Amino acid sequence: MTATPLRAALDVAAVRGDFPILTRTVRDGKPLIYLDSGATSQRPRQVLEAERAYVERSNSAVHRGAHQLAEEATDAYEHARERVAAFVGVQPGEVVFTKNATEGVNLVAYAMSNAATAGKEAERFRVGEGDEIVVTEMEHHANLVPWQQLCQRTGATLRWFGVTDDGRLDLSDIDTLITERTKVVAFTHQSNVLGTVNDPAPLVERARRVGALTVLDACQSVPHQPVNLRELGADFAVFSGHKMLGPSGVGVLYGRRELLEAMPPFLTGGSMIETVTMERSTFAPPPQRFEAGVPMTSQTVGLGAAVDYLTKIGMGAVAEHEKQLTEAALSALGEIDGVRIVGPTTADSRGAAVSFVVDGIHPHDVGQVLDSLGIAVRVGHHCAWPLHRRMGIPASVRASFYLYNSVHEVEALAAGVREAQRFFGVGK
Amino acid sequence: MNLDAMYQEIILDHYKNPHGRGLREPFDGESYQVNPTCGDELQLRVRLDGEQVADVSYTGQGCSISQASASVLTDLVVGRSVDEALSKLAAFTELVKGRGKVEPDEDVLEDGVAFAGVAKYPARVKCALLGWMAFKAALVQAGVDKAREGAEIS
């Protein structure tokens, strides 16, 4: 085994020391084993302190006022933008702060609706009858429902890539699905259920050839592996602060500069204008055009601190650590009779969301037993109902790991699943 | 946390050997309920004979709590008057929404008292009420206007 030195790159004990919540107990004194970072991650002290320092020292409205606090707030906000942009390899002007990733997808989808009545520069965003929007069967509802709705508003047609039995994207019909009629190809970089990591290259290439825009859901990839959005080549991408050690209430929409410059706004009002008369208004250049109203600031500062924290540890080390946990989980769960992994059963091109079903026990009941042992997992369809239907199951249990989880916690999960089988009298 | 307090034997028995399961004809009202957070589903039919609940039949998939609750429901309401059934619905709803602070009346709720443990877990209240809300909606569809009032699922 030559990989040993690499695997020592992340000191889990030291990392855990930064997360106050991980020291608490739940359900009558059980140490918390938090395996639900795919839903929301925990925040290190460094993030909490950055938010607190901002609120205690500099809190005021960004991009307004001539006083010192306004200046400091604006600097803090824009500095966070710079660091977030650098983290994913793009320019600060290409980063739009939104409430969350869901709002980012909606922003693009509504901007495309609004293009119908916007100027000539917005022509490439127009969608109507005869046009097609392509998604995949493994999307989170956040990257599916907004596109369904856009199709309903405009008369466009929704089409989608299927998923193979082992949880991979089925690209066999790529040339018939992405055609001259396609206006948007929206797909996830990493499935929040299956853990599958999709290679954006073939989709981006094909979309570019036919002149379609690509929208990448990077919610589960940016927090967990090194991601350079410029290199991936997608036109737009979204991710959420609260899944990458940052606060809730802030997300990111990345858009290629030339596209953001031509795209009409979604929300309108203060901050996003250039000139306003009683009759009409003109709009600010991006990213301000897409940030109407006083923006969230302490959250953005917290996200900047989260990015600093992750950068210091190194995303390569984070990914390597999670790969180790994923391998351990696939192996420990795979050994249990009556447990079926939903998604790839090897750690290749796969992230640390491990979903599974247990024969004879509903996922909700498995989750309840795990909860009684202090283990927090997600149960249900994880906002990917069509995917669960495709996999032939109504729901699943999902354990999702992050940099602060240990192999010991993976073992506790497997022991908990066996305990559920014992309690409900199934399995061996 | 004591798992046995939540998953009492009565609940597990109903889950493993559900009463009244299956969809039957004829029926006067029907309802399909789903728990959007977890995907649990229940389709339920009610047949009335004048003021009596003559039959409740159902099918669905979901966790032990939702399925056992539907089974207990059929025991409690079939053969009763609509008024009695509605008062049991009210008592059951009060129990499971009571955060563990409501003392159930065994004379009214019979096996339903076993759900007292579930009441301590807010995330499972919807599971326990799925069948009951389907029953309520099916009664409305069957023309029982007074079923419109009272308990709501959330």
Image (tube, coloured by chain):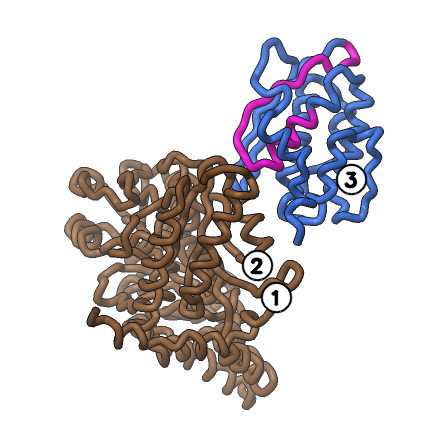
Chain colours: A brown, B blue
Image quarter of the C terminus of chain A = top left
Q: What span is colored magenta in the figure? A: B50-73
- Residue A150 in sight from this viewpoint: no
Is A124 above or below relative to B71?
Answer: below
Q: Secondary structure at mark 2?
A: loop
Image quarter of the N terminus of chain A = bottom left
Chain to which the residue tagged by mark 1 belongs = A
Most foreground residue, A329 or A17: A329
How far is the residue under mark 3 from the one under mark 1? 30 Å
Question: Which quadrant holds residue B92?
Answer: top right
Is A424 above or below relative to A211?
Answer: above
Residue B66 is covered by the magenta coloring: yes
Is A59 above or below relative to B99?
Answer: below
Is A176 above or below relative to A343?
Answer: above
Q: Amino acid at mark 1?
A: Thr
Question: Residue A25 — which label?
Answer: 1
Q: Amino acid at mark 3?
A: Glu
Residue B19 is covered by the magenta coloring: no
Question: Residue B94 — which label?
Answer: 3
Residue linked to disc 2: A374
